[in-house]
Amino acid sequence: MTRPHLWLILAASIAILLLCTIWSASKLDKAGIPPVYGMGMPGPGNWQPPAEPGNFYLITADRLTMRDITEHAGIFDSITGGGALGLISTGVEGGMVPDSTFASIGAGAPLNAYGTAYRGLNRGELFNGMPAGESFRQRTGLQPETGAVLQLDIARIKKLNAANRNNAIPGHLGALLQNNGYNIRVYGNSDTYNSPKRAAVGLAMNQNGSVGEGDVGAGTQLRDEQFPGQIRTDYEALLETLGNQTDKGLTVVELGDLERLERMGKFLEDDIIQTKRRETINRMVGFIASLVNTIDMERDRVIIVSPTPRGNNVPSANYVTPVIALGAGVGPGLLTSPTTKRPGVIKNTDLAPTILGFYGIDTPARMSGRGLMLIPAKDALPGVGALYNKLEMNFQARPPVLRHYVLIQLALVIISLAAIFIRGRKTLMQALKPALLAVMSVPLALLLVPLLPHFSIPVLVAQLVAVTVGITTLIHLWLRNYENELDPFIFISLLTSLCIAVDLLMGAPLQKSSLLGYDPVVGARFYGLGNEYMGILLGSTIIGTTALITRIPTGRRLVLPAVGAYYLAILYVIAAPQLGTNVGGSIAGAGSFLVTMLLLAGVGFNWRTLLKTAATVGVFLAGLVFYDLQRPVESQSHIGRTAELIIRDGPLAMKDIIQRKLNMNIKLLKYTIWSRVFLASLFTLAILFYRPVGVIQSLNSRYPELYRGFIGVVTASLLALVFNDSGVVAAATAMIFGAPPLLYLVIRTRSATQTSS
């Protein structure tokens, strides 16, 4: 095949694949199509918030799953028909237990309240033979009001969170409502025999650990000999109590029967658990439907939420939990928020700002969430159910798939080094070349696989293997007889870089569904450019462009400015708040692209050059922050919110951010398998610079621009490590386009040397 024909085929293939990616991605995620209305913002028709807000009912039904709702759609229709649905990504400090999930909602930020749900009591209940009010006074020095509900462990909660990295304030929601003249009430519990559990107190309490009124004791329980443990919620008593409320404010209701079944599950047969779950769900839905018919839905609002994910006795993995909103200002549709910017997904920390916004109270900076928003839809249940299944499958598939990918990388690095240093291994060297290309093709395959339909993990894995083999085979068949060994890098690297960039311009629908993308279940990132693909984007861009410059020695005066323009475009995609919004990636990209361009331009490096480079990156970052700060609060990314935090708290906030990043990277270095890839890649590069003698010098003389590209990738990897929370992961993925290409070229060089000898 002649050279012009080959490049024409490659260019056409890239163009077709990009067009298919754009078209399919536009079908994959409709985030930007429908209008979005805030639940505290004016909107058309029934989205208009009430002029005079009434009561806000937060109904907690722990261990309720999305699958419960989809499998009992007929039962839930009376609730979901006129409401908005979504899924909650739960974030806490410490263990994922109801104590912390409830308290985090009340703080509006991830919080640790482990082991404190047992200490929520009515003022008159006995605790260690003493009225809870007296025990509260002894512990806090405060005299509780008559009829108050108390969290006796408030001092312990504060101490547990003294060094909270999220600056969470226990009881922040309750305190703000109380300070603005609104009542807070709490009812219900998850008690079992001789084992009280009142997690809702941690949600409703103020900063002193007190709730103005309510009943979390026996008054909300009913003795039922047919129910495991013989205690369940008295729904009729709760309904009567809630119907007698007159003063507007927040009412938190804990429907604890599903949690009781979870705690009793180890003593019950599976069929008994599922039978009692169905009975409980029927009672809960009946209670909520009766409440909705009782209250003023033009002024009141109801949110039903399941705060705690997972569980040993729930009918699904339950990594994300359902949330349903009804009442004033709410119509049929999907729930979302500026925190996630993803249709159908919210954070648990978004609930407190939503309640505050209902009463016109501004969200404080110490709350990490943002008020909920609505995407109108006639029937949201099928869409949310499908999203739930996809998130659950990806969450379960991600660890084993990525672990095996990393192990394969490590094995190839070790085998490649052995093949380089042991003479007479020509057959092994020939086999390693396509294997190294396959390793570089996997990130692209992981990005493209979401375009294919899959309904099980085995099918997903089979598709990943097929796409990876397809890409590698395509390259091998087209380029195996071509005289230049750089063509595979140009094809894989630039195609990977372009696909990631196009995906970001489309709103990152492929990353949202990729096993190498960010995970709403973990909740570290919901939009923009994740650290995994950030490292891949930097590495593939630098290697692809420097290989291209090396491949086209003529016309360098035109190619170099074009590469610089491409770097700027990629940097914009990484940094723009409405696109990649990755601060650490912006710094790593600006630094590594600038270093690569200076090296390609022949600029010598000294302290003055390094300082100018750092200053340029700093100016770029300052401009990015300034731009994001000018945007509306609901549109700001975490770049602007972080800047506001630093402006407000000064050096202390900066210290906390640096400490958090350092602690996270130390943790990842110890425990994540990605750290092995990063260290192995650095070790490989260090060895190859010294042994075999003369090989690196030979590559430098043959491919000087690509050699500078390797330096750029190492720079990107190190900067990503320093400036990101999970920098180890970004550093490791950047090195996918560092170590394997270098090993590939060294193997080819050694193989050619052995053949000639």
Image (cartoon, rainbow, N blue to C red):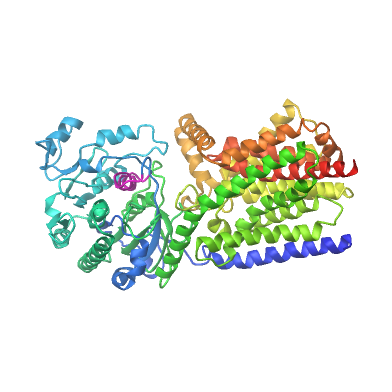
Measured from the top left, where is residue 92 in percent x and y? 38, 44
The answer to whether 153 appears left or right of 82 in the picture is left
Q: Which one is nearer the viewer's eye here, 502 or 544?
A: 544
Q: What residue is rendered at 21% in x and 46% in y?
A: 197
Say left or right for 398 vs 254: right
| Front residue of 229 and 446 | 229
Residue furthest toward the top? 607
Q: Residue 551 versus residue 300: which sits nearer the camera?
A: 551
Residue 142's x, y, as percent?
A: 18, 33
Residue at the far front in the pictured view = 424
Asked whether residue 535 is in view, the answer is: yes
When the figure is inspected, residue 108 is found, relative to residue 14, above or below; the finding is above
The magenta stretch spans residue 104:
yes
Magenta: main secondary structure: helix
State the residue in front, 78 or 640: 78
Q: Is residue 336 above or below residue 751?
A: below
**Image quadrant where residue 506 sits:** bottom right
For the record, the magenta segment spans 96-109
Quarter of the view holding residue 441: bottom right
Give the residue at x 41% y 73%. Answer: 378
User: Residue 641's x, y, as percent?
Assistant: 48, 44
